[in-house]
Image: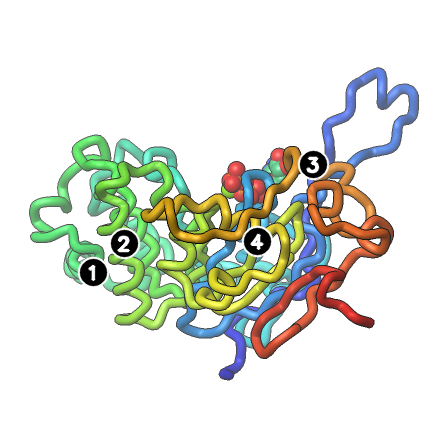
Amino acid sequence: MSEPLIRALNIKKYFPVRMSFSGALRGEKQKWVRAVDDISIDIYPKEILGLAGESGSGKTTFGRTLIRLLEPTEGSAIYRGVDIYKIKGSEIKSFRRKLQIIFQDPYDSINPRLTVRDVIAEGLIINKLVSKDKIDEEVAKALEDVKLTPPEEFINRYPHELSGGQRQRVAIARALVLRPDFIVADEPVSMLDVSIRAEVLNVMLDLKEKYGITFLFITHDLALAKHMSDRIAVMYLGKIVELASSEKLIENPLHPYTQALIAAIPVPDPSAPKVEVKIKGEIPSPVNPPPGCRFHPRCPYAFDRCKVEEPKLKEVEPGHYVACHLYDKS
Ligand SMILES: Nc1ncnc2c1ncn2[C@@H]1O[C@H](COP(=O)(O)OP(=O)(O)OP(=O)(O)O)[C@@H](O)[C@H]1O
Ligand SMILES: [Mg+2]
């Protein structure tokens, strides 16, 4: 395989739990939400890496920390040979332009007082990427790339004059004009009507092909992750528990948690055979994750070792990684 575009190395992101005044007076120890707890993963050029897992597993926190929208607690993110967590001052601007994010909610992420032109042109102007007289041309090109055509029809509109899907495509165009290498797409269609999701997703797939953009595609929907991604990583309580090519992960899931997520995917044919893996209870708090394997209290196969020893993410067949003692004979 080629060199990774981005290497996450032992990334942790902990948030302080707000203490009560009386607790602080009593000298209670500061507690931490371990939202991302030691993640290492290589992301390769031009791939779409899906990141799946239940609500609260830390997907958004990981995506944002990876591109340093959040400062990490620990770890490194190596992008083109440089640890972006160590970059200071004016250099930050140039790498930030290359690593973009598309948020879940296009209603929140776009300034309602700006026209489509101004939303998209803002980054071009700040980064001085094109001369003034070329801005409209560049904006029009981006609108065409996200299939808001003809551009003249959209360029002077305000966000409220667009549908949700169109607004999300404006958000993609805004990232696109910065000529990014890497885009974190954080549940980019989950707020949109089911009927218009496909067109937004297809725009992303086209951009990957046309410009070779690499994506981290965050979703809680494994079926969607499979449709979009080359590989899928599954997160549970701040950790990656399984990583494989999309086909492998869906057809031959190894981690009991992945198996349970897959069993929960609705199938078009209800009579189709399906592995039933039932997981007990709810996702525990990342403030006090269970000892040993974090999944053990919910795992139907847990045995003694799982309660005391944290399993490491290990390669069990080429390209297929799992963190589970069932597969670790050492
Ligand atoms: N700024 C913050 N301060 C404190 N805790 C936070 C903060 N942001 C996230 N968390 C906590 O970190 C954990 C992971 O949250 P995160 O939003 O990353 O999960 P997620 O997998 O993206 O979930 P969802 O599918 O609901 O979007 C949760 O327990 C959440 O409450
Ligand atoms: Mg999230």
Question: Could you say whether the residue bearing mark 1 is in a helix, strand or loop?
Answer: helix
Residue on which the image places disc 3 = 284
Question: Could you say whether the residue bearing mark 4 is in a helix, strand or loop?
Answer: helix
Residue at left offset 25%, top offset 37%: 164
Residue at left offset 51%, top offset 63%: 249
Q: Nearer the viewer, mark 1 or mark 3?
A: 3
Residue on which the image places disc 1 = 145
Of callouts 2 and 3, which one flags the residue occurring earlier in the amino acid sequence? 2
The picture places residue 293, in percent across and down from the top left corner, at: 76, 51
Of callouts 1 and 3, which one flags the residue occurring earlier in the amino acid sequence? 1
Establish if 257 lies above or below 160: below
Q: Amino acid at mark 4?
A: Thr
Residue at left offset 33%, top offset 34%: 107
The picture places residue 64, in percent across and down from the top left corner, at: 54, 50
Residue at left offset 20%, top offset 47%: 117
Of callouts 2 and 4, which one flags the residue occurring earlier in the amino acid sequence? 2
In space, the residues marked 4 and 3 are separated at their CA atoms by 17 Å
Residue on which the image places disc 2 = 173
Query: Quick check: is the Cβ at mark 3 less than 8 Å away from ligand 1?
Result: no
Contact between labelled residues 1 and 2, with CB atoms less than 8 Å apart: yes
Q: Indicate the quadrant of ligand 1 in the picture.
A: top right
Q: Amino acid at mark 3?
A: Pro
Question: Seen in the image, is 61 located left or right of residue 130?
Answer: right
Q: Amino acid at mark 2?
A: Ala
Q: Amino acid at mark 1?
A: Asp
The image's mark for residue 258 is: 4
Give whichever of 217, 89 is nearer the camera.
217
In space, the residues marked 2 and 3 are separated at their CA atoms by 38 Å
In space, the residues marked 2 and 1 are separated at their CA atoms by 8 Å
Q: Quadrant of residue 32?
A: top right
Of callouts 4 and 3, which one flags the residue occurring earlier in the amino acid sequence? 4
